Each structure stands twice: as C-alpha cells, then as structure tokens.
Amino acid sequence: MAVHNADIAAAFEEIADLLELGDENPFRIRAYRNAARVVGGLSLDLAATLAAGKDLPKLPGIGEDLGGKIHEIAATGTCKLLEKLRGRFPAGITDLLRLPGVGPKRVRALHEAKIDSLEDLRRAARAGKLPKLPGFGEKTAQRISDAAQAQLGATRRFKLAVAAQYAGPLAKHVGGVVAGSYRRMRDTVGDIDILVASDEPEKPTERFVGYPEVRAVLAHGATRSSVRLASGIQADLRVVPKESYGAALHYFTGSKAHNIAVRKLGIARGLKINEYGVWRGAKRIAGEAEQSVYAAVGLPYIEPELRENQGELEAARAGKLPQLLTLADLRGDLHAHTKATDGHASAREMALAAKAAGLQYLAITDHSRRLAMARGLDVRRLEKQMAEIDDLNGELSGITLLKGIEVDILEDGSLDLPDSVLKKLDVVVAAVHGGFKLSRARQTARILAALENPCVHILAHPTGRLIGEREPYDVDMLAVVREAKARGVALELNAHPDRLDLNEVHCRMAKDEGVLVAIGSDAHGVDGFEVLRYGVGQARRGWLEKKDVLNTRPLAELRRWLASARR
C-alpha cells in the first residue's frame, strides 16, 4: 500500500498527541509537531523517493531519529514508537484533544475517569459526571459536551490539500478525473468522486476496487462502486459511456443546488438533463461535453468553482460572469517567513524558491517580537534583516525581495513594533495571533483600530480560523471590509490549506466593496509556494478576477500602490 506525505504527517501528529497525553518532554512533542508540519507541506513524495532508492532530502528540524521514523512509516505505514504509544492509551482518546477547550490536562482527567472517547464523553455528560471532574465546571462541561455532540454528528471531512494526495493517484490509476467538491475547490472534501468515460466499464471498475489503498469495498457494481481507503476517506466511482461524459462531469461536479437550477432551466425548454445527457423526449441532443449542457439551456460555460447557485446562473444569462483569476496571474507573494523566526530557510533560499515558482517578487514578513514561540523580531533584529535584504537584492537576478514584517495586533489595536521602524519597510502585514476569545465588539474594535495605522498595508488571515482546529474569532467582517476600503488596506487570502482565510463569502464581500485581496502563501520553507494554487482556487470560488488581487500587479505598479497606501 502506498504511503503519502499526509500519512506520515498524521503519524507524527498522533505521536505528538500521545506524548502530550503522557506528559512527556514538551521539546520532544514540539519536534514531532514540527515534523508533521514540514512533511505535510512537502510537494516531494517522500515514500516514492525512498522506494526509488534515493536519499531522504535534508528537511528542517528533522535529524537522524525522525528521518529514521520517516523511513519506517514510509515502508510500513506505522512505526514502533507509534504502536508502543497506542498501547498505552485507548483507541479514540486523541479525538478528545480535537475538542475546543480540551487540552492534555483535561483529557488526562477524563482518562482517569474512564472517559476515553467522544461517545464516552457524551454518556458522561448525560449522566452529569463532567462538572465533578478536576478542571471542569458547569459552563466548561456544557461547552465541551456540546462540542463532542457536534463532532459525533458531523461527517468527517478532509482538507483539500490532504484529499489531493489521495484523489490524484486514484484518478490516474483508473484513468478518470476527479469531480465533486474537490473539483469545485471546496476547502474541505467529504469524499472523492471519480468519473471515467469508457465503453468497457468493467475494466476501470476492477482497477478501482483492486486499488492497493482500498481498505473496504462498500459497493461493487457494473458502473458504480464505492470504497473506503486506508486513510479513511471514501471514494466513489462512476463509469459512463463516452457520449455522456460532459453531462456526467457536470452532474457529478455539482453542487446539488446548481444542478437543480440548471435542470429547471432545461424543463422550461422541454428538456430533461441527467448524468447521461440532455434529452428532448427520447433523443439525446447534448452531453458529450460540459459546454454542450450549458449551451442547451442558453448559457455560456460556468467554471466549476462558481457552481453553488449563488448568482452564477443569473450572471451567465446577463453575460456578466467574472474572468476568474488563474495561478499564472500571480506576479509575487506578500507573505513569507525565514529561519530568522519560525521559518526553515534563509531569505536567499526563499528568494530562489520563489523565482523557481515563477514569481517576480517576494515579501519577507517574519513575525514581530510578541510572538515569542516564533522568536519574533525586535527592532534591532528587524533592521539587521532589512540591511541583509538590501544586500541580497544587489546580488539576485530575476527576483526582488521586499522588506516586510508580520506585525502582531495587540488587544488594544496597537501594533507590536513602533511606527518609526514600520515606516522603513516596503510591506507591513498586520495579524491577530492571540486573544481569539474577545467579544465580537472588542475583536472588531481591535482590528479596526489596527487598520487606522497608516503603516499597515495588509490584514493577514482576517478571521484567524484553522480548518478543523480553531473556529474563526467573532468579528464583524462587513465592518472590517469597509474600514479596509476606507483606509486603503488589502485583505489577505492566506493560501495555506489549514487556513484559506478569507473564505469565499468574504472574498466576494471584498470584491463587492472594492477592497483588494492579497493571496499569500505564508510559506515557511522553500516548498511553501506550492500552496498558492489553493489560494487561487478559493479566490475563484469568491468570484475574484485578476484586477481584484493585489499581487497580480507588476512590481513597479505594486510599489506605487504600497507608496500611495501610506495615508
């Protein structure tokens, strides 16, 4: 069975969780979490590299011990340490760590009370046991109980970048394409939908159910099959005749609401639209290509990312569909880190990687001093880095580095570094990194105050969400968007797959209000620019065009904007 980077990263995360539950050395725990982040963000397939007899590349923070475990997991899917730790705790206990407000200390208290799973927690809550446990009170117990109930009732979803590691190889194996929410670039994916056009359906079907990563076959039919992969994700296969390919691709891409709306347009014209084609009575009149489905109802082609029944049909009818942003439109990246703080590469290495990714400029925006865990820069270290960037720009060709900072927004809305140094920078990116539980009024006032600072160019990851890990903080986004417009500040769409913040709704809000969006990789290493494609996908879902995105501008034009933004 193939092992993907996501599997290795998941193993390291589980090791870190179990070490934390065992109250082990925090530095050791941090090393495994760092290894999970590094491996999870790599574009290079580590297991395939090792299987080809090549050496493991040098990876930041991963020495001989962790490297050995990568070899072990790549070869077997697990490692001795993980299996040993699993033997110390009941299966499912790490699910408790995913609940908001439940850290290792509380999970240990739950474990001592023989509450070792979400279902155990639900039963204990119903029996009124939680408030009696150490570190729990009535309000905390209720909040944790509600979170457990919500998680038990939720369908498991996978981050888009994780699903990509499984969807692409499977589609290639069966000779098909990936449809569904994956094709629409949703930030999370519930399952993988594979479509194959073939007049011999038994061949792709047998390849599908015989795929080495299949753990269980849920259904096996002539043209429809479902399996569960070893990663836990469900994959569904549909095989259709070649003449039905376009209609089927439209149908299985969705969304359901979009498809229903298109079918209603067809009914109004006396047509029936399904996965096999567009029909007038018993005669198929279209369906070989997706474009023909839309043409049959009098519409131009609608890009997959727009298919949510959120006005795209009306825009298509009026000839007002957006010319959506493409990855090739990006000229630079305005959010990246180096090993001066919590990154894994030097400014030079990051510059060369950005150039190799096809970018013309890169802003170095390391953290400011308040973020102690990231070894944030104080004034002295920042000024030293600025001088180093000037020197590098004298040596580099084909790429320009911009001097920047990701400066913390403090709880009163002030910034973590004085204006006297911020004014010397090319780009100032302001961000919230703490105080996530402030009230809506206080959080909004905090951010609005930061936007008033004339040094700020970009508000980073504006709602602070981490998909599946941390809910967005409570903030009035319309007020933030309008203040950004008034102050000439751009809003970041953070392309990291854990964030994708702004979401598509807020992207569209920014577009409607005339606020520029900056798509930033938040790269912490030389592989970090790979995620820009996910940011572009999210931007497309938010109807963004090239003109709506700040870093599609050539460097000279960008510099003019940055200069004019200083109020």
Image (spheres, rainbow, N blue to C red):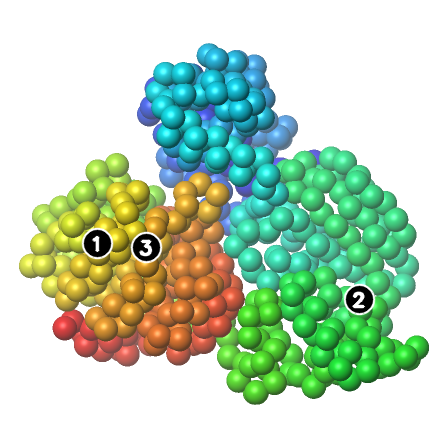
Q: Residues within 10 Å of mark 1 (few under 14, many from 20)?
A: many
The image quarter in which residue 373 lies: top left
Q: Residues within 10 Å of mark 2 (few under 14, many from 20)?
A: some
Q: Reading the chain from its start, which is encountered first: label 3 or label 2?
A: 2
Q: Nearer the viewer, mark 2 or mark 1?
A: 1
Amino acid type of the residue tagged 3 in the rendering:
Val
Residue linked to disc 2 = 275
Give the CA distance from mark 1 to mark 3. 10 Å
SS for callout 1 = helix
Residue linked to disc 3 = 475
Label placed on residue 446? 1
Is residue 395 something that shows in the picture? no
Amino acid type of the residue tagged 1 in the rendering:
Arg
Do labels 2 and 1 touch, CB within 8 Å? no
Total numbered circles: 3
Q: Residues within 10 Å of mark 3 (few under 14, many from 20)?
A: many
Closer-to-camera residue (197/252) = 252
Position of 505 relative to 115 (above/below): below
Residue 360 falls left or right of residue 115: left
Closer-to-camera residue (63/146) = 146
Q: Position of residue 450 (x, y in %)?
A: 19, 58
Position of 129 relative to 78 (above/below): above
SS for callout 2 = loop
Residue 39 falls left or right of residue 224: left
Q: Which residue is found at the position 79% from the left and 40% from the top?
A: 218
Position of 140 relative to 199 (above/below): above
Amino acid type of the residue tagged 2 in the rendering:
Glu
Residue 172 falls left or right of residue 15: right
SS for callout 3 = loop
Q: Position of residue 312 (x, y in %)?
A: 57, 75
